[in-house]
Image (cartoon, helix red, strand yellow):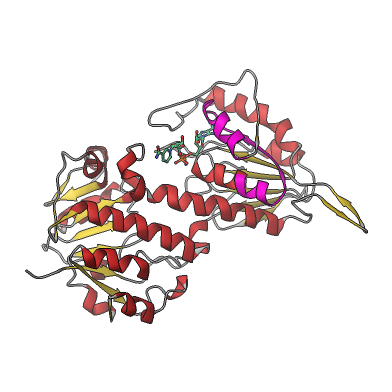
Amino acid sequence: MTELTVAVATESGPDERRVALVPDQIGPLRAAGLAVRVESGAGRRAWFDDDAYARAGAEVVGRAELASADVVVAVGRPGDDLLRPGAGQLVVGLLAPLSDPQYARRLADLDVTAVSLDCLPRTLSRAQPMDALTSQANVAGYKAVLVAANAFGRYFPMLVTAAGTARPARVLVLGAGVAGLQAMGTARRLGAVVSGYDIRPESRSEVESVGAAFLDLPGQPTATGEGGYARALGADEQRAQQEALVARIARHDVVITTAQVPGRRPPLLVSEDALKQMAAGSVVVDLAAGPRGGNVALSRPGATVVTEEGVTVIGAANLASTVPTAASAAYSRNVTALLLHLVRDGSPVVDLTDEIQAGVVITHRGQVVHPAVAALVEGGSR
Ligand SMILES: NC(=O)c1ccc[n+]([C@@H]2O[C@H](COP(=O)([O-])OP(=O)(O)OC[C@H]3O[C@@H](n4cnc5c(N)ncnc54)[C@H](O)[C@@H]3O)[C@@H](O)[C@H]2O)c1
């Protein structure tokens, strides 16, 4: 029987430093009967060199030699040159089919079986080792605090020195999901006084468990949605929430925002009014900044803006990629767990009655099989 070949290429995103498989994970894949081919240099930007892959049992090759692989694993979307039309290739990555369903259609037309880790049913406990959204959000939440501390003109911890006493920074984290809780814990470890807020009331105990105080907004709605996520607020509720936050935000030196609602534009939590009320030197990092807007007025992904009042607003873009070694190691474990789940006796077995596969398999045998993506494809123009 010929071995199933897994290809790992250099990521195509210009600022992407992560790699989909790190040398540590080659052994478990080989033990399961998979051969791994790695493009020379694919791990370099995450500090994994070709020799480490070769020592771990991978074949280091030129890019052209990847195109014949049966499985392509990537962090984002793989380059088109890696796709072989009509070959029933398996492609694994964070493919974002819900925000670009036409990409899924294109993969189906190429007869690619597309597996998108961002569609994993995260609350299933047996899916947790594959949860790349969580592993990457942890990295991003950690880095957001370092980005904020770097832009802040004072200390995070209280420092008592012969030259005087510095009070600790007051940090507020809005959104207490994976990234938010990691940001709270990291800011606490740096010595800041940390508060956290989320619209889901059950997040209070999680906020407190990482050493932060829960910020109460009396009179504001709670908004627990499905699967542990928040529901979107109505326009009036949103306005009331923004107004209730203005005075609280003004009492903090650093605000880190991480609020998301699946499939929706991120809620605006820090209004222009709130930015105006903050003291000069304050820093706001918007982890939700994206093409559809973010949690903070004026934030744009990848851009830093200093307001007239002296508040630095940082639109974070792909922070996980800026901690590439840790982010790649975690992502690689997620990918390996997923491949070991999909492969039986050396061959991928697509079984849409399996709850994990029903979530992550987007296209198969020329069809868009994921119901939510298929509905979007049908609803859009082809
Ligand atoms: N294995 C598991 O069971 C598992 C794994 C991952 C996440 N989760 C849970 O899923 C949930 C979402 O996690 P995530 O990090 O992907 O979330 P996310 O990135 O979708 O959102 C981040 C946070 O923003 C909050 N938010 C949304 N709108 C808001 C608003 N208007 N104001 C304030 N906060 C707002 C959400 O409640 C959420 O906590 C959490 O409850 C998390 O614990 C569970």
Point out residue 249 in the picture as x, y percentages from the top left corner. Answer: 70, 36
Q: Indicate the quadrant where residue 16 lies.
A: bottom left
Instruction: Please tell me which residue lies in front, 337 or 99.
Output: 337
Point out residue 222 in the picture as x, y percentages from the top left corner. Answer: 53, 22
Q: Residue at x 55, y 50 (%)?
A: 141
Point out residue 36 in the picture as x, y percentages from the top left corner. Answer: 25, 71
Q: Residue at x 36, y 61 (%)?
A: 332
Q: Is residue 171 visible?
A: yes
Q: Residue at x 14, y 64 (%)?
A: 85
Which stretch is magenta?
A: 185-210
Magenta segment includes 206: yes
Q: Quadrant of the N terminus?
A: bottom left
Q: Indicate the quadrant where residue 275 lies.
A: top right
Instruction: Please tell me which residue lies in front, 97 or 173.
Output: 173
**Left of 356 or right of it: where is 328?**
right
Magenta segment includes 3: no
Point out residue 269 in the picture as x, y percentages from the top left corner. Answer: 60, 36
**Left of 280 or right of it: where is 197?**
left
